Amino acid sequence: MSEDDAWRPLAVFTPARIAQGRAGNGLPTRRVLEFQLAHARARDAVHAPFDAPALARALGSPARLLTTQAKSRADYLAFPGHGRTLDEASRATLALGRFDAALVIADGLSATAITLHAAALAAHILEAAPNVHWAPVSIVTNGRVAVGDDVAAALGADLAVVMIGERPGLSTADSIGLYLTWRPHPGATSDAQRNCISNVRPGGLEPAEGARRLAWLMNLARQRGLTGVGLKEDAPEALPDGRPTAC
């Protein structure tokens, strides 16, 4: 068995580029083309247009369509801070209330991920946390994680739950991140005060399992009054049939 063949059995367990083979001193043409395709998909995910109204329809429940201070995709990419706060027109549509949590869906760096998976993932999240008093869903165009602070504070929600398209890599361009923040303060809350569940997608962390872990963290956050580095994710692993193991 050649050196390349020795690695090949491991390739079925990972999307990482191993056991690529060899053509002289380089890669086989097929592998080069696969790499170029993955790179193109990653670039497309970053620049793809985000159809927020279509997502609102797919959710099947009322949703607010919001925008940030980023006036274009180019502006969003060049000036990250513009995607962290709502524009004044959007903020004016949010009325202060009293909610347990606010679900904020943002395109982030992969509109592709949100377009493909957000509606189904949102349904899993609401199903996993049925006793939570949710604010109406907010859909943010050109949003970054911190925009959830702005939305939750404006609505009077204890928890900000941000579903966002993650930076695409060369293994996947459709990954979603879930960020949880307890009583955020716009402009003052740091990333160390958030919990993140990453790589939520079919083929990664299954959406139903991601929602279950999020519900576990939300319950723990409410009990302890915090999120971030002080809140350890110790949710029990789920059995193949979906039942969690004992703590």
Image (cartoon, grey):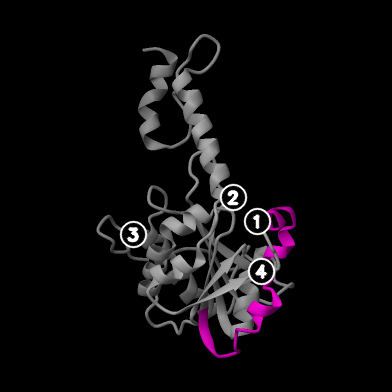
What label sits on residue 238 in the rendered view? Answer: 3
What label sits on residue 224 in the rendered view? Answer: none
CB under 8 Å between callouts 1 and 2?
yes
- Kindly report the distance in space between the C-alpha atoms of the residues bearing marks 1 and 2: 7 Å
Q: Where's residue 227, x and y in %?
A: 59, 71
Upstream in sequence: badge 3 or badge 2: 2
Upstream in sequence: badge 1 or badge 2: 2
Q: Nearer the viewer, residue 115 or 244?
A: 115
* Label 3 crowd (10 A; few <14 / some 14-19 / many >=20): some
Q: Nearer the viewer, mark 3 or mark 2?
A: 2
Residue corresponding to mark 2: 47
Drawn side of residue 147 relative to residue 31, left or right: right
Q: Where's residue 37, x and y in %?
A: 49, 34
Look at the image and give the residue range highlighted in magenta: 73-101
- Residue drawn at (51%, 18%) of the image: 27
Residue corresponding to mark 1: 73
SS under mark 3: loop
- Kindly report the distance in space between the C-alpha atoms of the residues bearing marks 4 and 2: 17 Å
Extreme bottom residue here?
Answer: 97
Drawn side of residue 69 relative to residue 155, left or right: right
